[in-house]
Image: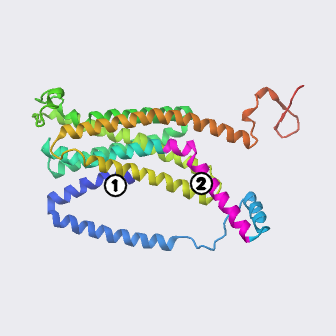
């Protein structure tokens, strides 16, 4: 919903601008801002009280008793060491960084396109405000539809299948972002791309099939974006659920969201490098960003292998039977269906 709101906004804004003018746009934004403030007030009063009973794990109770038995200075020192160790574990977790490797490059490409697309559609395709908003609508609809489909099939995939799915989607997004701005040349009376690199103002006849292929690439961009952002949310969610206490959960979530926003901000900064009237510079930038996410895809696959190994080690440390061969277990009648380890000399 977050990404759909971002790309649906230009469509509604352009529709209001074309129908009632710029003054109505600002009045609409002001009204929606007031509505958001009211919603925030409602959220504030719906928050639970701070003195509500919290569920305390037995391990946490034991740690609390040990800390209380020490002096205040020792307790503070021990608590600081514990928190610092937890932060180190978060920052060195392969499960956290593989999710960041997906969301940060994807956010960088998405933010760069959101700034380049209106300029490109204006000076190259001669689109008006409504048609520019329509471009973002194609991305939004395909993004939302793909996210719903992924939500149904994600749980059916194995760990290795999920890794392959995300890797291929990241590569797909890199390919689409590298070719999106030249897709309008299909079917039009255009020069070759190699000639356009030396001619900053190539002409392109606005044939209908040229626009259709450009719209198709916008749809594919939404599909590829959803294939990156949606699994990234699932990956970080699984990691946060595996943490022990609320403090580490909030820390991991905060680190992930910060790096996500950093990727978006970096994409916005890079989109300001090309000239606003040079589509060639814009195309070179998007192609470079596409190569970056393709490199990130290979890195993600490697880090995912490390994360899977960490999961197996954690399972073994928790006393599960995953590390022992199946032949070492024998069924004991009358034991309620439990398997008892049997070791031979």
Left or right, 48 with respect to 109, comes to right
Residue 65 sits in which quadrant? bottom right
Tally of numbered tags: 2
Residue 303 image offset from top left, x and y in percent: 53, 36
Q: Residue 5, labelled with which disc?
A: 1
Give the SS element for disc 2: helix
Residue 108 image offset from top left, x and y in percent: 36, 46
Residue 294 image offset from top left, x and y in percent: 39, 33
The quadrant of the image that shows the C terminus is top right
Residue 58 sits in which quadrant? bottom right
Task: Specify start and end residues of the magenta stretch as a single range.
Answer: 72-99
Residue 67 image offset from top left, x and y in percent: 75, 65
Q: Residue at x 69, y 40 (%)?
A: 315
Q: Which residue position holds label 2?
A: 87
Mark 1 vs mark 2: in front:
2
Q: Is residue 96 magenta?
A: yes
Q: Main secondary structure of the magenta part?
A: helix
Q: Is residue 283 magenta?
A: no
- Does residue 165 sit above or below 22 in this rendering? above
Give the SS element for disc 1: helix
Q: Residue at x 57, y 33 (%)?
A: 305
Left or right, 190 with respect to 158, comes to left
Crowdedness near tag 1: few (<14), some (14–19) or many (≥20) residues, C-alpha within 10 Å: few
């Amino acid at each position: 919903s977050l990404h759909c709101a971002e790309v649906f906004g230009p469509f509604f804004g352009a529709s209001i601008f074309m129908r009632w003018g710029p003054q109505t746009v600002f009045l609409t934004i002001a009204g929606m801002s007031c509505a958001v403030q009211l919603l925030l007030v409602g959220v504030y009063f719906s928050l639970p009280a701070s003195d509500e009973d919290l569920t305390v794990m037995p391990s946490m109770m034991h740690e609390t008793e040990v800390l209380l038995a020490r002096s205040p200075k020792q307790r503070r020192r021990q608590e600081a060491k514990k928190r610092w160790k937890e932060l180190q574990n978060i920052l060195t977790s392969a499960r956290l960084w593989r999710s960041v490797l997906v969301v940060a490059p994807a956010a960088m490409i998405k933010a760069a396109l959101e700034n380049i697309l209106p300029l490109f559609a204006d000076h190259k395709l001669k689109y008006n405000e409504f048609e520019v908003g329509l471009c973002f609508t194609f991305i939004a609809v395909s993004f939302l539809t793909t996210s719903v489909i992924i939500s149904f099939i994600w749980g059916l995939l194995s760990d290795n299948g999920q890794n392959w799915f995300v890797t291929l989607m990241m590569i797909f997004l890199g390919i689409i972002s590298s070719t999106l701005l030249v897709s309008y040349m299909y079917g039009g009376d255009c020069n070759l791309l190699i000639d356009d690199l030396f001619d900053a103002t190539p002409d392109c006849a606005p044939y209908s099939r040229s626009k259709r292929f450009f719209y198709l690439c916008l749809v594919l961009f939404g599909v590829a974006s959803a294939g990156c952002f949606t699994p990234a949310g699932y990956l970080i969610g699984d990691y946060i659920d595996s943490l022990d206490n609320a403090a580490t959960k909030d820390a991991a979530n905060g680190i992930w969201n910060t790096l996500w926003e950093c990727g978006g901000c970096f994409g916005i900064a890079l989109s300001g490098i090309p000239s606003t009237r040079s589509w060639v510079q814009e195309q070179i930038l998007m192609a470079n960003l596409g190569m970056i996410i393709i490199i990130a895809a290979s890195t993600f696959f490697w880090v995912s292998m490390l994360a899977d190994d960490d999961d197996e080690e954690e399972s073994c440390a928790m006393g599960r039977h995953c590390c022992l061969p199946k032949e070492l277990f024998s069924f004991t009648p009358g034991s309620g269906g439990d398997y008892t380890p049997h070791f031979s000399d």
